[in-house]
Image: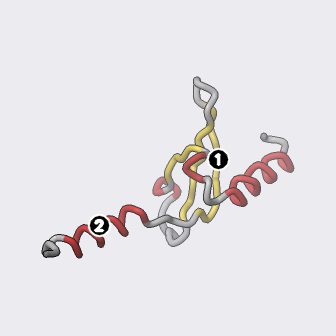
Amino acid sequence: PPSDLEPLLDEAQEYYQEEYEVEKILRHKKLEDGSIRFFVKWVGTVGFPTSKGTWQTESDLENAPERVQEYWASKSKSGHA
């Protein structure tokens, strides 16, 4: 018989699998190992200070390749790539 916990487990799994939409990449930094981290502002955080953004790896942003491309394009235009 199904457990009473199954609905709770399903709900928890959905919560942790939820994806958030990238509004904009604000800056990047290169780490000693050569990897790059992007500082991301998320959709739905209007009015929140920039400090509420998060640092993400490029692989973390694999579902938002257009935002990564937009970021690098803006950097090449400003000469700060």
Give the amino acid at mark 1. Answer: Arg
Q: Is residue 13 left or right of residue 62?
A: left
Residue at position x 16%, y 70% in the image? 5
In primary-sequence order, the first of circles 1 and 2 is 2
Q: Position of residue 50 (x, y in %)?
A: 52, 57
Instruction: Tell me, for residue 6, which label it has, or none.
Output: none
Instruction: Tell me, for residue 27, which label it has, or none.
Output: 1
What is the crowding at mark 1: few (fewer than 14 residues within 10 Å), some, or many (at least 20)?
A: some
Dots 1, 2 in contact, CB < 8 A? no
Q: Which quadrant of the figure has residue 63?
A: bottom right
Helix, strand or loop under label 2: helix
Q: Position of residue 34 (x, y in %)?
A: 63, 27
Residue at position x 61%, y 45% in the image? 58
Q: Is residue 73 left or right of residue 3?
A: right
Q: Position of residue 21 (x, y in %)?
A: 56, 66
What is the crowding at mark 2: few (fewer than 14 residues within 10 Å), some, or many (at least 20)?
A: few
The residue sitting at the top extreme is 32
Q: Is residue 64 above or below residue 79?
A: below
Q: Is residue 55 above or below residue 18?
A: above
Q: Which residue is mark 2?
A: 12
Q: In terms of depth relative to the viewer, which is nearer, 17 or 51? A: 17
Residue at position x 61%, y 65% in the image? 23
